[in-house]
Amino acid sequence: MLPEKILAWGKTRSCIRELAEYGARRKAEIGAENVYDFSLGNPSVPVPECVDEAVAEILKDSSDKPHAYTTAAGLLSLRKRIAEDVNGRFGLDIDPERIYVTCGAAAGLTISLKAVLEPGEEVVVIAPFFPEYRVFTEASGGVLKVVPAAEDFKVDIEAFKAAVSEKTRAVIINSPNNPSGAVLSDNDLGSMADILREAEERYDRTIYLISDEPYREIVYDGRSITSPLSIYADSIMCYSFSKSLSIPGERIGYIAVNSRMKDAGEVYAAIMGAGRALGYVNPPSLFQRVIEKCIGVTADISEYELNRKTLTEGLKSIGYEYVEPEGAFYLFLKALEPDAKAFSERAKKHELLLVPSDDFGCTGYVRVSYCVAGKTIEDSMPAFKALFNEYSK
Amino acid sequence: MLPEKILAWGKTRSCIRELAEYGARRKAEIGAENVYDFSLGNPSVPVPECVDEAVAEILKDSSDKPHAYTTAAGLLSLRKRIAEDVNGRFGLDIDPERIYVTCGAAAGLTISLKAVLEPGEEVVVIAPFFPEYRVFTEASGGVLKVVPAAEDFKVDIEAFKAAVSEKTRAVIINSPNNPSGAVLSDNDLGSMADILREAEERYDRTIYLISDEPYREIVYDGRSITSPLSIYADSIMCYSFSKSLSIPGERIGYIAVNSRMKDAGEVYAAIMGAGRALGYVNPPSLFQRVIEKCIGVTADISEYELNRKTLTEGLKSIGYEYVEPEGAFYLFLKALEPDAKAFSERAKKHELLLVPSDDFGCTGYVRVSYCVAGKTIEDSMPAFKALFNEYSK
């Protein structure tokens, strides 16, 4: 009698959460130091001091009412700071009146999809992709259209072109990518934008590029990131402070509608409507003020680059295959047998918790989250070696 | 090209917010003390000290990671405290494993409705009702079925009975009520429960009673509240700490599925699925801990009872008509002409901001929110008098 899909989403836990919960039980059994838990994308780097300092300052200020309702879109003073920051860093001209502060990037995505999708319309994603994209799309009545990535986990331009049709209403990109760590190049973005503009013209409809970018500050080798909004007018940015400030529990991020979008005002109104319809009254009020004070600050994300080095060098010397991640804190490792779930199960025997790739939309890989203590990576190497040897017999 | 309803919800602001924004502009023009702003339900009573003290304590505790992800349903330690508190006060046996902590009551309602509604199913509400019930119901594909209240703004049992049909999937009740302040009696609840049980049997379907109760601590004349969960098994409680702790901006509340519900486990799973589908990853993590420390505490809500006295006695002596509110902090005042919007406009000329009743599902009234400083009420009396005199000419 209950809606079937909703019930299924409640019952089938995400494989990531399931593995993490197994890990928690296992750590209680044999000690945390004996479990190499690479399951979750929970930032390991400490929260920067500015966050707790900001909280203390805000609560001391008796002229403010930090726990009262704010406007649905978030405090205008915060939206101005966000626009300044993002415009300065990415050469954009986002209008504070086109920013909608959200309860994290997940809310940003569900609100954006609800704002633009009519039932049956398609949302194109490149696999591997964050599994919740499927849930978010289907919850708004849309249909997920999965395009396998190229071998380097970036976009396969021909496959992408073939997937865009008269039913496409949106494309979600996620660069740096969870779970592969791939970063789309300016060329990739340019080619995708050309294809989308051509399709918009051919089918006489708007196709929105939704850029899910919680990892954009976490890039390696001195790489810089180009904002998709500077390349494609019909773009919507979804950002979260979860990873850059190590505060994923607080649920704070934002949607920014590209000022260069022709219908920016209408799309922003639909976002306001969707946020209201989904029950988002306003983003958490105290943390709106915290972000206003901490804008531009990041946690010490250099630790992740060090982790990447330790992990990839160690695994390479054992004989594992992977594509070097360029950002985020995930390594997409080739499983040593075609069945990623079976491989993940065998890894468990060595106390290695690696997420099988199936839910990310492709087979034969595992995701290794290296947002963990450096020591965990070092200590895990004998287990990775033993697992490898099992397959070499 | 954008979904019509969503766009409309984004464009047509709620009349409450619209009036409040007019109020903000007007205060800037002529001084806050000269505008009698009764538009918003923003708690006026100070946040109890325990809230900021809890924040300070939590941030001092270096063993905790208060900004990290929590489980989707909220910390189990918090859910245990909530169950203890609510079971103790209302004689219930809610299981912590059937509590789902939410970003406020609005999220609780959207998640509950998404969890139980199939497209086209009906949700019964008693008018006057909180206008967002319509948005939340329609956003989940449901149809709102409005039943006019009895003259005392409580339930008209015959009308309620007539509204429940083979299409009914849920009933939303809100006692104490926004906007009337009416509290359903045990008799009312009992009769409604009988009607629903009979309908469940007749139509062989479950009908969920969704109890939206953010005002349950704010009741007057020493009144006590009976929980609908103790009277009707297929009940879902939606609560928010917004009003009892004066922290509406922080977005924290919970859903509790009645342990006596036959399908409690399935409904809880659907709630988990709906929360995931709407993008609610976890409720704000710092405030989960704050609530754990402040459970059972309320702001000094006795101030609202004092406000009620000042307001109702003042208005009565002028000649206004109303039904004495038994809870919440709203007075539903009979407009002095049939068109509530026209009356609200004339009130504005006297700097009185009163919300017309049309969006609450009935005509000819205005909502007066008396969660304001006592002085505002006193100072507003000459304006109320002048407005009354205008109509007496």
Image (cartoon, coloured by chain):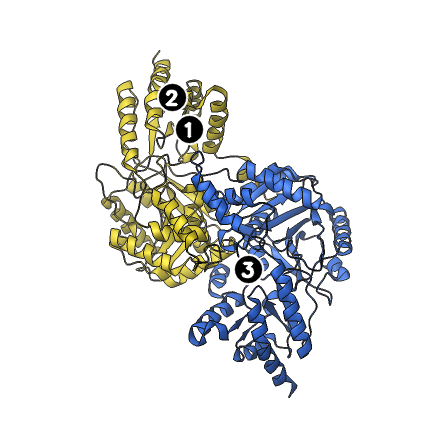
Chain colours: A blue, B yellow
The local crowd at label 2, few if under 14, some if 14 to 19, many if 20 or more residues have their Cα within 10 Å, is few
Of badges 3 and 1, nearer the viewer stands 3
Please, what is the three-letter code of the amino acid marked with disc 3?
Pro
Chain holding disc 3: A
- Horizontal side, residue B362 vs residue A4: left or right: left
Chain holding disc 2: B
Label 1 to label 2, Cα distance in Å? 11 Å
User: Earlier along the polypeptide chain: callout 1 or callout 2?
Assistant: 2
Same chain for the residues under marks 3 and 1 in the image:
no
Between B292 and A293, the one lying in front of the other is: A293
- Callout 1 secondary element: strand
- Horizontal side, residue A131 vs residue B112: left or right: right
Between A31 and B232, the one lying in front of the other is: A31
Q: Pick out the residue farthest to the bottom.
A: A393
Q: Pick out the residue farthest to the top.
A: B393
Label 2 to label 3, Cα distance in Å? 60 Å
Say which residue label 2 marks: B337
Please, what is the three-letter code of the amino acid marked with disc 2?
Glu
- Callout 3 secondary element: loop
User: Residue A62 is drawn in which quadrant?
Assistant: top left
Residue A179 position, x and y percent, is 62, 64
Quadrant where the C terminus of chain A is found in the figure? bottom right
